Amino acid sequence: MNVLENLKKIVSDFLRGKEPYEIAVENFVKELQKTLLRADVNVKLVLELTKNIRERALKERPPPYISKQEWFIKIVYDELSSLFGGDIKPQVFPVKTPYIIMLVGVQGSGKTTTAAKIAYFYKRYGYRPCLICTDTYRPAAYEQLYQLSKQIDVPFCGDPKSSDPIDIAKKCLSYCINNNTNIIIIDTAGRHGYGEEEYLLKEMQDIAKAVNPDEVMLIIDASIGQKAYDLALRFHSATPIGSIVITKLDGTAKGGGALSAVAATKAIIKFIGTGEKIPELEVFDPRRFVGRILGLGDLPTLIDKLKSIERSSDLEKRLTKAIATGKISLVDLYLQIQTMRKLGPLSKILQLIPGLSLLPVDDKQLKISEEKMDKWLAIINSMTYEELRNPNIIDKSRINRIAIGSGTTADDVKELLKYYELVNTMIKNMKRRYGLLRKLGIDLSKIDLGKGE
Ligand SMILES: Nc1nc2c(ncn2[C@@H]2O[C@H](COP(=O)(O)OP(=O)(O)OP(=O)(O)O)[C@@H](O)[C@H]2O)c(=O)[nH]1
């Protein structure tokens, strides 16, 4: 992570730079390569990433209101996010309770600390965690987890006199369930009496058989860098690993290597450890992580624009579908108003859709003030799902309820509904004109209509 922090400077230098675009891109890519290699990211992954970035940078044209430089940063943001796992978001909250999590990993990876961190994390969300120590090889492990459990005030179970981890696991599991806890976290040994990893993996399998965990979590120390790839695969082939926690990202230059290596195995990184203290555990979200290392949080205008691009591409799909079918929903209208607030008039947004720039749009008729847009967004937010699907049912009493719910007046609600009718008529006309365009050789079926609602 420390090395990756360097990216913030590269981004801000790029955005302030005066060189021609192509040269600036080339310099950026070189610096990015150096930084990633120093963070121990695999060479092949780095080359693939920079190839994609270069290609997209030369091919893609930014949407209106976005400079070429800003669009380039968006490309880097996308590509780096997919290097670290893309849009995969871990399922953090258990689908059932009691939920049994078994932590595995090699010696010193941070398992015991992470067990307490996870217990504390779930406790903060109202769950009742319980900690179990099954490590019979490291004498201090029992005391360490016991002390941590006292610190966070969570029930704890273990047996320092026993040398049978399977027996401890079974007994303690009953103890936790009898104590009405609902997230049971089992810490296992990191080393084995016989010293070899295969014994450790065997013990892990035996405990798993005895307790039937809902999730096996592999704990990996970030400082092993790209070696994390092989480690994750080895553990996975012994027992299917449900998720991974990467610890000590705060203390190593190789964090980028460990994260990208694990992401390359397609395993899910659920948490990252960012310090020795109990609260220093975060849910891992690749996009948020990349946003932070690129310093996007320090560039609020850019992040705002990037968000509106994402929103507008969703809107593009919805509008294309609306024009094809001649119908627009209130949800589409909501997105349209939100996007207009950021990107400007509807005609500009329609220009983004292939073929549609040929259709005339009367912006004057559709112009609404920002104040009105805010009111209308609040009104749509106050509607029920049924009303959004079928606005025809919105009668007088519903209008009054929506007005109260959104802090507006009945007249405001009526005005929005009128506007909605106007847009619907416009979309119907567009459908007709679009039919004409098709006759002129522009084929609507070639346009991706998206999934819609
Ligand atoms: N800086 C930092 N240190 C951490 C983090 N997680 C754990 N540690 C430290 O790493 C060291 C080892 O952690 P343990 O929790 O004892 O490791 P373990 O995997 O249980 O060790 P074994 O029982 O031998 O397998 C301790 O000094 C922890 O404080 C982290 O996210 N950041």
Image (cartoon, helix red, strand yellow):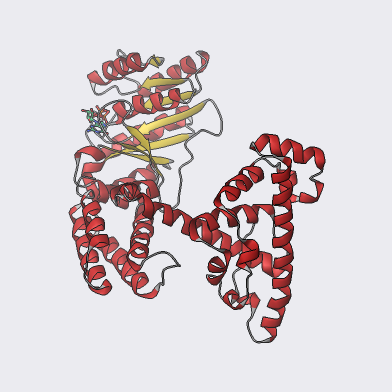
In the image, is residue 427 above or below residue 307?
A: below
Q: Residue 189: which quarter of the image?
A: top left
Where residue 406 appears, as percent x and y from the top left, is 65, 38
The residue lying at 62 percent from left, 52 percent from top is: 334
Which image quarter: residue 44? bottom left
Instruction: Look at the image and tell me in which quarter the C terminus lies.
Output: bottom right
Q: Is residue 93 above or below residue 128?
A: below
Which one is in front, 161 or 177?
A: 177
Q: Is residue 300 left or right of residue 127?
A: left
| Percent x, y of residue 358 | 60, 78
- Total marks shown come to 0
Residue at (35%, 27%) from the top-left corner?
Answer: 117
Q: Residue at x 44, y 26 (%)?
A: 122
Check the image and report above or below for 52 versus 97.
Answer: below
Furthest-bottom residue in this view: 440
* Quadrant assignment for ligand 1: top left
Residue 416 position, x and y percent, is 69, 51
Residue 98 appears in the rendering: yes
Image point (63%, 47%), residue name: 376
Specify whether 159 is left or right of 87.
Answer: left
- Camera-side residue of 227 and 338: 338
Q: Specify whether residue 326 is in view.
A: no
Locate the N terminus and report the quarter of the image it occupies. top left
